[in-house]
Image: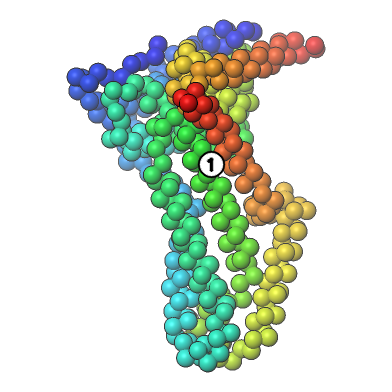
Amino acid sequence: MQLEELQSAWQKTNDRLDALQVHSFALQSTSSHRRFQAETIWQLAFAIPTVFWSGGFLFDNLERVLKNPMLAIPALLVYALSIASIGGSIWVLVQGSNLDYALPIAETQKRLARIRAFNVRSTRAVMLLGIPLWVVFPILLIQTILGYSWLATFDLTYLIVNILFGIAVSLGTVVAAKRAPQSSKLFRTIDDAFAGNAVAAAEADLALFAELSEEVKEVKR
Amino acid sequence: MFLRGNLPSEPRLSYEQVLQAHAGLIMRVVRTYARSSEDQQDLLQEIRLQVWRSYPKYDPSQSLSTWLYRVSLNVSISWLRKRPQVQFATDPDEIERQYGVSVPEPEVTMLYQLIDSLEAVDRTLLLLYLEGLTASETAEIVGTTATNVSTKLSRLTTKLRNQLQTENNPCN
């Protein structure tokens, strides 16, 4: 079979399908809504209450943490991490919604690859910093639900030991994900994030589309 | 083949009129990137939404089909990145929905297998080649030079010829 035959096969199938599908195309609803950057919205949905939560926690325990500032470190870290996560998510959402899909493909895809690379890197940073901080979440949760402040009775050694334990657990998870990435979806995601596969894919796209659009700039010069 | 844009004196088409007039173009892009009817509907909705969002900024002095190709191909390339590997249909009803007949001709099956084996950008180049667009028209859509398009198309067609020869003479 030759390429010309492919062209005629393409035409034949499309003529046949156009006759069948154009009508249904016209009847479809225009009120569809896209699952627009759902992942980023989920990050925001988690980060915004966390900011209020950790901020409120610090405010409620202001007197205690002023007496012993070291006790404020976990909540301050969660607060800072959530603010950084919100900043990153808003940047991704703004860049994504300002993206012009009517620009030449190389240009639009280059911008998309840049957003994707940023998104993957920031998610990885949040994961790296967030996992060891797990210890502060139960403290905040109990404080919020029961109104009982563990900060007042907990000693610093307990917190440090728990943070170290969190680091050990997260390192163990990364190693396990690396050894058996196919055993679960979570392990695959972790392995992709830490091995840099997702960043590498976004950067490869960026290089490909930058190369395509650079040639136009060369000709214009 | 390549449709020119509306003349400035012509009344601007409404969003629905644009979709109606170019339904075939959009559906051909959809069929290049999505195989199952469920995926095709999903991609179609994404394209419709992006056309609706971008249309207020459309400059009527520009070719409408070039503009539509850009929007629908940009959406399709992004959509394809989020998808796992294409699954070929085995259900007779699904085959009919995909090919318009219950038993597709071997060359049609082969064509779609070739399309599915290509990366997103090569798929775009092949689609525009099959649609009969020239290298400079393709370059305008992709955002590169006509020379670059010709080079890439030449490599792509050589690769496809080799693949076709292998398919035709599996013993060689």
Label 1: element kind: helix
The chain under label 1 reads A
Q: Note whether residue B105 is visible.
A: no
The residue pinned by badge 1 equals: A113
For the point 58% across and 84% down, the residue is A70
For the point 59% across and 66% down, the residue is A130
Residue type indicated by callout 1: Ala
Q: Is residue B164 above or below residue B140?
A: above
Q: Quadrant of the image for the N terminus of chain B?
A: top left
Q: Quadrant of the image for the C terminus of chain B?
A: top right
Q: Is residue B11 above or below residue A195?
A: above
Q: Is residue A143 above or below residue A131?
A: below
For the point 61% across and 32% down, the residue is B87
Neighbourhood count class around disc 1 (C-alpha, 10 Å): few under 14, some 14–19, many 20 upward: many
* Total marks placed: 1
Q: Is residue A168 above or below residue A105?
A: below
Q: Note whether residue A170 is visible.
A: yes
Percent x, y of residue B133: 46, 14
Percent x, y of residue B106: 62, 13
Q: Taking A103 as reference, is B36 left or right?
A: right
Q: Taking B78 as reference, is A27 left or right?
A: left
Q: Nearer the viewer, residue B29 or A27?
A: B29
Q: Nearer the viewer, residue B25 or A13?
A: B25
For the point 34% across and 36% down, the residue is B54
